[in-house]
């Protein structure tokens, strides 16, 4: 150890696209996850934890046909030469778990899980290679009442986090409606040329690019502001017109009337069986939303919700925040998606060979937390609430230790200074630590059976101007000297004054 | 997707040495971690989260000199051909974090972190390749008062988990004392032959093998019951005698008198400077323990605590549970270590080139949780508290949805059945789910404005004997029919009767 430290000194750096999360954010995320889980629990979901690693073949929607399987996924071989992958979401491990334990599970099976997932992708601003998801899924529920419940639960989650109604929307579509649209314009979803994916991706861009942009993407292609050209789907004008009709039949009525959106979609889809089935499913969901009092101020039907993942087979939904923010270029945009989900009746089929109906909702934890910090009235970072007991006399460590313990036993977070420097350094430490109070017992105080308490919140201004030790003692406004026996009471009084007593 | 499902069907299996964790254990672990963190917080530690991945060179105490670096660690190259490793503990990432952010941190820096760690090792019974740790560390505290605090906090953690005093012990030693012992018998800790490690490993086995076993391991070697031979350290008889003196000077006084242990060690260590320094440090710690009222029923000095990790440089400690259990062979043994820690003043030096004092304590979360389940009075798995609303009439889903919502809004976990099967299957589902109550509203009930509540806990016995649907309705003991408007009150009354209302 000592030797290698001399011969090789690694550079300490967090890996690219990964990050360290400090105290305030860890606490805020834990609080947020607690509220999300409480909603999930109230809906009857039970927790399940799968491990971070899965066999690559069990995990992979991208199957191994290369030397290094699963692009986008971190994969490696263990000592048995088995390929393992770090999970890239919480849905694929759930599919593996259900397939492995199928007979023993109650059907439907409701579980929630939160935890990190990993992507072997190019990181960028706000794009990390590890991030947290918090998912709830129902496996074995064929009825769209399950999907309706997911949408309502999504709304309930956002309101449990104090996002005002009107500032978010659960936007719902159905892959069957989109399949019907494609069928109507004569595009096969099975075709090798994947034109259908280009069409879906174009529709998905409607809220960013508008009608004109989507029209270009559906046709020959579109050049963006930077001059980059995106090749289009190459549709004919009448095909393009139908797709735009579809998109706008959602648009005109969005946030107004779900039944009217379905009517518009019905006209576009014509007599496509799959399309009509999709509309009928949404009609059932609408009835449930309406009966439960979820108006279009919470849940809307929306043409351009597509959801890129290949495994969706029915209703799909996104939870979008409508609060405004700035994009990289400084333009005002709505915050966008903080959660999403949908029905994936084919995912477990990979293992079992038979369809197992499933639907789920996933919260993007980091994005949602970022959004919460933008809400008016969001808590700014709270002051730390830890009381620092200075250790001015090395022979009296036991005495300082006792003071610290007394505070802890009274429910106050407390630590004694353990760095071995003098008073100035100790006060600086307490300041850097964000401590609201320091407890000071020097020789003089001890001789008199007293302790001095310094209120660092009140004293912040004063302390910056004072140059020598003696003056510290004299800045009476921010400090008080009390009998040793009254220390705990006096500390609690200062904490209470600043609203720092009994933090949750 | 659909195509590959036809051509390739992976086997659904959790990878070797990994596991899925069910609801009861996830909840129990969360509750336990909450209590541990509350103790850490009360001691002034703030949370920090580092990501699961680190650059291999920054992480590794085993440095890359092979094609595949870091034996025992899961490592792989990312798209930039950088070697990344899954963290194998929470200490190495902390060292990286502190080195990277050194100037901005308050010193001492107190942080706690809990999360999974991974080992690329052969799994075995109770040995997993992913497990959870929960660590608290102080970086930048040179004084042993910091180590003393770690030991006392370890005891406080165990008592916060209701482990009775006397059923655990924090066992403390000092690597400097062990270095002094080695110096006294003329064995270099720097020597290439690593005899010193063999001696330390032999001492470490004292509680398992006793005096005779350790004597053999210090000498030529020892053959165990299965006939396997372990080569010994090859010490001479007088060296062996000194080591055994040392071990037994701890043994005789363990749980009796810390000062007496130090006196015994002092005689063995003689005038080794490093040994005397170690004893002096422990003397200071003893004074702090005693002043704070931590007797030998909580914290003892113990000769055979060694801690295998190379990076320890001072006081080391283990939290051991003394409750009895059976080993693989059916022998009664004490449960053993559930946490450990120590001082590691050299770990951050790897990056910074200067020593940065540090000490920490780490809880082995899964092991501790397993131990808690063995305590007398441990909660057995609690009944689920989710109420199931049956959906007997597909045209009335909105009505069932409304009932479910009312229950949730009254603070009751509730779900409506979403599987699309008949009544028998739905009752079976509720039973498999562990639900205490089902809410039944068939046509008859609805016509009368009533709902039937079935108490499944009371009814468990009855239900197993009943064969036909009509009889269900007649088993009056376990069910009650109430007006629809009184449903919530009546459900809560049943839950309350079974102690299932307002679960934490």
Image: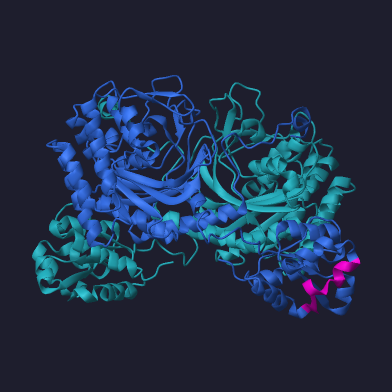
Chain colours: A cyan, B blue
Is residue B476 highlighted in magenta? yes
Which residue appears at 44% of the width and 37% of the height?
A: B87
> Picture quarter containing residue B288?
bottom left
Is residue B23 highlighted in magenta? no
Where's residue A114, x and y in %?
57, 50
Residue A336: tell me if it is visible: no
Magenta residues span B470-484
Query: How many numbered discs, if any?
Result: 0
Q: Is residue A189 above or below residue B497?
A: above
Q: Is residue B138 left or right of residue B404?
A: left
Where's residue A120, x and y in %?
54, 34
Question: A461 or B375, which lies in front?
Answer: B375
Question: B406 or B370, which lies in front?
Answer: B370
Quadrant, the C terminus of chain A: bottom left
Which residue appears at 63% of the width and 59% of the height?
A: A40
Where's residue B286, x and y in %?
22, 53
Q: Main secondary structure of the magenta part?
A: helix
Where's residue A109, x and y in %?
72, 52
> Picture quarter containing residue B436?
bottom right
Question: B35 or B484, which lies in front?
Answer: B35
Q: Residue furthest front?
A: B212
Quadrant, the N terminus of chain A: top left
Q: Is residue A213 above or below residue A253?
A: above
Residue B138: tell me if it is visible: yes
Q: Is residue A121 above or below residue B365?
A: above
Q: Is residue A447 left or right of residue A349?
A: left
């Amino acid at each position: 150890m000592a030797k290698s430290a001399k011969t090789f000194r690694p550079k300490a750096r967090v890996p690219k696209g990964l990050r360290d999360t400090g105290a305030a954010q860890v606490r805020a995320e834990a609080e947020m996850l607690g509220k999300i889980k409480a909603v999930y629990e109230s809906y009857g979901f039970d927790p399940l934890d799968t491990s971070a690693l899965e066999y690559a073949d069990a995990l992979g929607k991208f199957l191994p046909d290369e030397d290094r399987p699963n692009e986008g996924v971190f994969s490696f071989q263990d000592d048995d030469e088995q390929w393992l992958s770090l999970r890239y979401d919480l849905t694929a491990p759930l599919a593996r778990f259900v397939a492995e334990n199928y007979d023993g599970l109650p059907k439907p099976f409701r579980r929630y899980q939160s935890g990190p997932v990993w992507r072997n992708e190019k990181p960028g601003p706000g794009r990390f290679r590890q991030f947290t998801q918090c998912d709830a899924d129902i496996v074995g529920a064929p009825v769209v009442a399950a999907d309706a419940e997911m949408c309502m639960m999504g709304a309930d989650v956002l309101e449990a986090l104090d996002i005002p109604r009107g500032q978010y929307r659960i936007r719902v579509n159905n892959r069957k409606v989109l399949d019907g649209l494609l069928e109507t314009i004569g595009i096969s979803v099975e075709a090798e040329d994947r034109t259908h994916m280009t069409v879906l991706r174009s529709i998905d861009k409607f809220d960013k690019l508008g009608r004109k942009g989507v029209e270009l993407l559906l046709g020959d292609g579109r050049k963006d502001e930077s001059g980059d050209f995106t090749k289009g789907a190459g549709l004919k004008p009448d095909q393009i017109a139908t797709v735009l009709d579809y998109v706008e039949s959602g648009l005109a009525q969005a946030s107004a009337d779900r039944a009217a959106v379905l009517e518009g979609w019905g006209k576009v889809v014509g007599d496509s069986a799959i399309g009509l089935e999709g509309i009928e499913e949404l009609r059932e969901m609408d009835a449930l939303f309406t009966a439960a009092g979820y108006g279009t101020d919470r849940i809307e039907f929306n043409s351009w919700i597509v959801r890129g993942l290949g495994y969706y087979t029915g209703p799909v939904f996104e939870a979008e925040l409508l609060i405004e923010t700035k994009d990289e270029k400084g333009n005002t945009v709505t915050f966008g998606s903080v959660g999403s989900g949908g029905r994936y009746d084919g995912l477990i089929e990979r293992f079992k060979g038979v369809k197992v109906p499933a639907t789920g909702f996933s919260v993007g934890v980091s994005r949602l937390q970022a959004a919460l910090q933008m809400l008016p009235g969001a808590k700014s970072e709270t002051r730390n609430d830890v009381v620092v007991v200075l250790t001015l006399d090395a022979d009296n460590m036991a005495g300082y230790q006792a003071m610290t313990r007394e505070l802890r036993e009274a429910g106050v977070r407390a630590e004694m200074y353990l760095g071995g420097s003098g008073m100035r350094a100790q006060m600086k430490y307490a300041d850097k630590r964000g401590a609201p109070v320091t407890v000071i017992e020097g020789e003089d105080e001890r001789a008199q059976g007293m302790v001095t308490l310094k209120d660092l919140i009140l004293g912040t201004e004063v302390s910056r101007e004072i140059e020598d030790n003696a003056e510290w003692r004299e800045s009476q406004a921010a400090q008080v000297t009390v009998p040793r026996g009254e220390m705990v009471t006096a500390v609690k009084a200062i904490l209470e004054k600043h609203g720092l007593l009994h933090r949750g």
